[in-house]
Amino acid sequence: MAPKTNGRGVQVEDTKICVVMVGLPARGKSYIAQRAQRYLTWLSIPSKTFNVGNYRRHDAPQPSADFFDNSNTEGERRRIFDATNSTKERRKWVMDLCAREGIEVLFVESKCDDEELIMANIRDVKTTSPDYQGQDPEAAALDFRNRIKHYERVYKTIDEDGDESHYTYLKMMDVGSQVIINRIQDYLQSRVVYYLMNLHIRPRSVWLSRHGESMYNLSGRIGGDAELSPRGQQYAKKLPELVRQSVGGDRPLTVWTSTLKRTIATARYLPANYNQLQWKALDELDAGVCDGMTYQEIKDVYPEDFVARDEDKYNYRYRGGESYRDVVIRLEPIIMELERSEDILIVTHQAILRCIYAYFMKKDQSRSPWMNVPLHCLIKLTPRAYGTDEERYQADIPAVSTWRGKGSTAKHEDPIPEASMSH
Ligand code: ATP
Ligand code: F6P
């Protein structure tokens, strides 16, 4: 659900959209739905995913392939929640239902005939599904392939017969190598569609690091464009080794830094064959009139602001500067580009890293500004079918803590366990 605007940014009413996935089994419907939800959640747009298979399992926990045969009427009755939405009748039923409730429908179809990819998907996620718990994986894969055959008999791709052209839909063929977009009506729909068009499923990782300790970090000042401290420079020298260790070879990465000296200096010793790019969008959260101050100075000069920020750190906007919410909006192009890319190493700042991390790990936006992101630590995130794996590589080079607890004005403070990123 999202506030609907009249095109000039004026809110007129709430839009409710139901994104309805279409496609044969093992075409990535759950995967795509979950990714869309993660993206919307990150943008603070309330959304939920409903996996129909989870409802069906209450009633039929471990059905064999025959259960999914369209001529099996008992199976059909119990599959009332079937979510392949692969017939015209079914799509019309969904449309009528949503229309009655005043909900917009966006059909998203994943069409894929690459048999090798489908078998890989089955082995990757289906043989480990609760449907096949305790069963031999090869037998499970075969049964699942038979399940798909039942659907293939009745499957009709959207608008195959030309009588669904009034529907709003995105049809993705072969993981987005070809797409058809039909009757997209508003901003939110176009955002979702654009996001989904950027997704790929090639294996890759994203590495995140803060810059090395800076002179401002030592003195407890925020913002600015300070040089690295001697320990920060040590980290910069150590970073290539940490990266090599975590990559597990000499595969070159693309490196993104901010435009500030401390991130550029941190990336300075990475191998020459790493392509480096500076993004203004990766610059640290703009502290406006508080730039260059310590937290104590902020409390002394702007006591009300100091309290207001602690009360709602995600939404608080520094006078003349930014809030975390503002940062998320300016990071959107970064997220889109990340989705399109392969291996990327991002060297950035505390607040920015929190926002990017929250996207990958689906962290609550009200809590992400309080996360502890230690200096001199490389984080490797590897997106998987239904989540993101995380590994950490410590440089073993001491650094001050720049984490700050609610109400505190300490220059350097030990983070409390609740602030750890894994919470
Ligand atoms: P089911 O109908 O059984 O619920 P599903 O269509 O929801 O199946 P998923 O469980 O989402 O399928 O399948 C996940 C797998 O699909 C992952 O291995 C993922 O890499 C892969 N995948 C993601 N997007 C696509 C796509 N556009 N085309 C084909 N495979 C994809
Ligand atoms: O202290 C380092 C720093 O990167 C500052 O430049 C920035 O203002 C701050 O962290 C952001 O963290 P917080 O939102 O916790 O103040």
Image (spheres, rainbow, N blue to C red):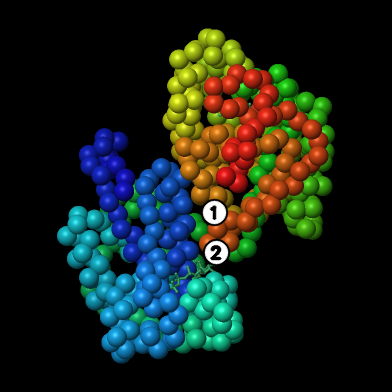
CA separation in Å, label 2 and label 1: 14 Å
Few, some or many residues within 10 Å of mark 1 (<14, 14–19, 20+): some
Question: What x and y, as percent, mark residue 110?
Answer: 42, 69
**What residue type is disc 1 on?**
Glu
Q: Which quarter of the frame holds ligand 2?
A: top right
Q: Which of marks 2 and 1 is nearer the N terminus?
A: 1
Element under label 1? helix
Q: How crowded is mark 2: few (under 14 residues within 10 Å), some or many (20 or more)?
A: some
Q: Can the viewer see residue 166?
A: no
**Which of these two is toward me, 191 or 37?**
37
Q: Residue at x 34, y 49 (%)?
A: 188
The residue carrying mark 2 is: 385
Say above or below: 27 vs 206: below
Indicate the secondary structure of the residue bearing disc 2.
Answer: loop
The residue beneath circle 1 is 339
State the mark number for residue 8: none
At x 40%, y 65%, the residue is: 51
Identified by mark 2, the residue type is: Ala
Left or right of 178, for residue 342: right
Res 299 quadrant in image: top right
- Tell me, yes or no, whether the two marked residues, 2 and 1, touch with CB atoms within 8 Å: no
Mark nearest the camera among 2 and 1 is 2
Q: Where is residue 403 in the image (x, y as percent from the top left)?
A: 63, 30
Residue at the outermost left position: 100
Q: Quadrant of the C terminus?
A: top right
Q: Does the residue labelled 2 lie within 8 Å of ligand 1?
A: yes
| Residue at image point 54% right, 22% down | 407
In the image shown, does 400 or 120 lie closer to the viewer? Answer: 400
x 43%, y 43%: residue: 43
**The residue at label 1 has a CB less than 8 Å from ligand 1:** no
Q: In this view, does 172 lie above or below 326?
A: below
